[in-house]
Amino acid sequence: MSKFRTNIMVCGGTGCLASDSEKVFKNLKLILKARGYADEVQVIKTGCFGFCEQGPIVKIEPDNVLYVRVGPKDAKDIIDEHIIKGRTVDRLLYREPDKGKKAHKQEDMPFYKKQLRIALRNCGLVNPEDIYEYIALGGYEALGKVLTTKSQKDVIDIVKKSGLRGRGGGGFPTGLKWEITSKQPGKTKFIICNADEGDPGAFMDRSILEGDPHSVLEAMAIGGYAIGADKGIIYIRAEYPLAIQRLNIALKQAREMGLLGENIFNTDFSFDIDIKYGAGAFVCGEETALINSCEGKRGEPNYKPPYPAEKGYFGHPTCVNNVETFANIPPIILKGPQWFASIGTEKSKGTKVFALAGKINNVGLVEVPMGITLREIIYDIGGGIQGGRKFKAVQTGGPSGGVITEEDLDTPIDYDSLTAIGSMMGSGGMIVMDETDNMVDIAKFYLEFTMDESCGRCTPCRIGTKRLYEMLNKITSGKATMADIDAMKQLCYMIKDGSLCGLGQTAPNPVISTMKHFWNEYLALIKDVDNYQEEGRYIATNKDGTTIRS
Amino acid sequence: MKVKSLEELKKIREESMDKVNLREHGEINEDKIEILVGMATCGISSGARETLNEFVEEIKKEKLNNVKVIPVGCIGYCHSEPTVQVNISGEKPVLYGNVKGKRVHEIIEKHIKGGKPVENLILHVDFERA
Amino acid sequence: MLQIKMGLRLDLSLKRGETMSNTKEMINIKINDKEMKVPKGITILEAAHEAEVKIPTLCHLDLHDLKMVNQTASCRVCMVELIDSKNNRNKLVPSCVTKAVDGMEIRTDTLRAITARRMAVELLLSNHPNECFTCPKNLECELQALAKELGVREIKWEGERMNYPRDLSSDAIVKDANKCIYCRRCETMCNEVQTCGILSGIGRGFDAFVGPAFNIPMVESSCTYCGQCVAVCPTAALTEVNHTDKVWKVLNDPDKHVVVQTAPAIRVAIGELFGMEPGTIVTGQLVASLRRMGFDGVFDTDFGADLTIMEEAKELIYRIENNKTLPMLTSCCPAWVKFIEHQFPELLEVPSTCKSPHIMFGTIVKTYYAEKNNIDPNNIVVVSVMPCIAKKAEAKRPELTKDEGNNVDIVITTRELGEMIKEAGIDFKNLPEEEFDRPLGETTGASVIFGTTGGVIEAAIRTAYEWITGEELKEVEFNQLRGIEGLREGKVKIGDKELTIGIANGLGNARKLLEEIRENKSKYDAIEIMACPGGCIGGGGQPYHHGNDEIVKKRQEAIYREDRRKKLRKSHENPEILRLYKEYLGEPFGEKAHKLLHTHYEARERI
């Protein structure tokens, strides 16, 4: 790419294609060739910029200029004016709809950035303790619109059409979940917000609740209306005091303004929300465990079926959605399902918030469109690996996921592709490891977490994870034999096969995936193979040629 | 006050606009400056509360009546907490990272009073909002 | 020798068979190549029985008639493979909770399923004390039986084991958390059937076990010691406090005069411990073996039961005639008494003030019997053989031990007596039948039926009828009061009065009746309550039924058979009882009787 001085990027997303970006692309290429710039300037078709209502979008790099509503005829001006003469084509620049004012502020300038913030749209922008600021940014309009102009079915249809899937990790279609709950018999139904975030290093939900609590309350009311619930519950871990405090302030303000309570927007719909506190058990993020905990029972999962949508909170149909899922709802209502569905990949729409951690330069929270590659997240957004070291692997899906190595970094990520490469979306933890990391230790770290967080209900998870952990200890202390490794593999699959809930079923994933990708590192620790060094010390070589020392 | 209809909500929105106009549109008619301090758990644990207090103190001391300090949520830049955004009407908002101790004074002196952003503290914003 | 028959499942499938023809909707499934039609809604485990396929289970327990089902799906021993060749997505599911659905293809015999099942057991064993030899549940342990059934020959996994101290705090139940396999049967029993809410999951992950909240010692909890947790525990995590050593000690003390009494429910159950069919009546062998063990007096708690009826019937008549508190509740069951003390402390005037039969008998032994035989009561040791664990704690209640010395000194369960007989080398099965000692040995059919739910109140009615009407009661069997269901009611006409009788077995059912009383909605004149499902025949100290509730029903049939065998069937016709009153006690419900045979209750905290 570097041999071209300029790149012209033409959006090839569905939205832009529909508005003729294909012709724009062709014209740009033809004219470039005609003007003799084909060797200097490259025209590239890209994925969606997330700005479809202004499409077709053309972006010039490295100039960072973005043109909107580019017609096939505009190709000539872009080449002649911008590329050849270096003058921006003013009439194609983005203008703010009402004021006809050209954008000059960075946030408003819709030139393509890797991140697109839907769930986090207000975080860091709005005072979370001031409902008027939220309203000023369009808050509660989605609720008003829904209650005064939409039927329950309309709302469900909108969410279904948007393609939104559960952001807690499972990826179940949200609209479908709402529909199933709405169709259950019974007058009393509940909608629960799952704010029991527990992956190590993940804090997406906390950020939303701390930065923009009203968006979750508004979405819960919308969801409540859609499924026929008049009661919502936010299940939040007690270790999130600030989020709890801001939620309580937000609840009070919303009630005072009648946006929660009886006859909201003067309609028949009444809805209010309670907060229930969790004690921070990871497994309580599993919806049946969460409901048990809400009911005051021991926080441990139940066998499904029945699913919460059939028999949930105190036996009533209950819909459990994650914080981030909810945060996506108001924009979907206001901007329409097509807008949301235009972002992302075929089966995973919209954006996903990730918490970047580990050996990455820009540790933090990012929200990116589905379909972005891990390489873009790690290098373009995350700023690459600390200390200029070599990337080794990235763990997604928290302790339930697996490691992804260099060879899969260019996979466009969505729910299905991550599963296909042996990991999972999960709730959004993303931990980056560099060449100095010992992968057996990494597997042990994750396994220790799930072992500690197991509720203990079923045998494979209660005792199996313990034994697996002990086995890993045996390996890292250089005392294991190949027979132990074989037994361990069998145990991994048995725990996956035999556990009652997702926690156990996914607990061995870090072990399985590190064994798959970094087998040499395991091998190096085994007593009865050649390159065993001495008690607990070993040298191993990875597939990629890096050497591991312990 | 209870909101009874969508129209009423929109009216409230209009009335509240001035609260966020500077942030939304970057330009307002008044000579008003906003300092947004990231006050989520991550920010606070990195010292955002002290930073916020120092801004308030400094502004009081300097009698800068047109400057408002607003606590906001997390912007996601954990690597550079505490983060502070300065919005001055008609100018590009500036996001600063690692704003602690003396840097508060520096921002007040150079940017708020002097109108010149403190270049070495600036963070590049690499996202857009839906 | 290791023969734990899980007879329940067979029984269950029979029952399902009956309903099968009635159920309209049938579905087609395939189990291990066998195609079959089963009613919609049944689990794979149940369907497998129809296919003559045995799936091992551990945590699963379905006490059908006792309305107790443990379906925690937690042990993962009953995993089977669902075949989905179309999508190439076979998966393992627990057969105990997974409902069969139309078109389902199930395999119980794939390597994947077998491995998962066996590994589940291996994992359990890897965290289980390796002490079968000395374990109280040796050869009665379901985990042990399962290990044999699945051919476990080595425990692959070495590692840390749970290491908790045993809870020996109570006089009745020993809790050994290290043997807890977390099946949660006890928890289901304690919370859902008995509604006591004592036992629940403690700790998390590897450290999880079942115990009272905050793992307080059992003695500090509101436990009633009904022992139903012990009855359903598959291992020795919950057992009774063993008192056999104490008994051997006193039997070998020449200064002690050791008197034994056996409860009505023992004679229809203890034979099971010697390989006899459930429901075999072994009263004669029981007496013979006790005598051979060296007891100086071998008596029948039935005598105490007849005495109880004299007092209780009189108290009922007194309450009816003087418009005192009604309904009156029976008080023979110490677990039930403790339940009301903890859970309904405001209703303590409702139960009869009668001591329980074995405590009454102990009192009589240490007073009347001692006087008559000129023995210093301090040298008498009364041993009760009870189907019950709560009786162990009852015998230690301060109000029952302070006045007359220890009225009952040692309580052992049916199981403990069985062990002692075996240890003594007595060939129980082939013993010649012998009779209880006299006096205090004559008993009636009324007292025998104390051993089953409905029996105490039937016995009381037999006597109250004749006392109220002054007429002879011709038909002594009140079928309207019989049965095994947890909550029953029956009407009994006595002269111009019609009494409405309520009967509850299982403390959860008792709770319902007590709640009615508290809300002044009770329609009953008298209520019989027994803490254990089925009554004392299903007591926590009885031979383990291992999930086969048919056994409990067979014991009940035997109890009624024994009643019919008796010449005397009404307590007040017992000549020795009449003599006791005449010579010693005076009037039933009179002053001396009150002093010796009645007690009081104490409000207790609910923890």
Image (cartoon, coloured by chain):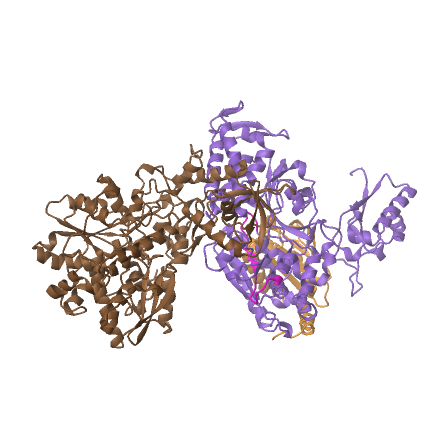
Q: Is residue A185 magenta?
A: yes
Residue at image point 44% right, 33% down: C156
Magenta: main secondary structure equals loop
Identify which residue, C32 or C85, lies in the foreground.
C32
Instruction: Inspect this view and state whether residue A443 appears.
Output: no
Location of residue C375 with respect to A461 vertically, above or below? below
Assign the N terminus of chain A to one quadrant of the image: top right
* Residue B71 sits in quarter: bottom right
Q: The orange chain is which one?
A: B
Location of residue B46 with respect to A149 vertically, above or below? above
Percent across and percent down for residue A385 are 63, 40
Percent across and percent down for residue A335 are 72, 61
Percent across and percent down for residue C92 are 55, 43
Residue sitting at the far top: A530
Q: In this view, does A284 lie to the left or right of C346?
A: right
Give the color of chain A as drawn: purple
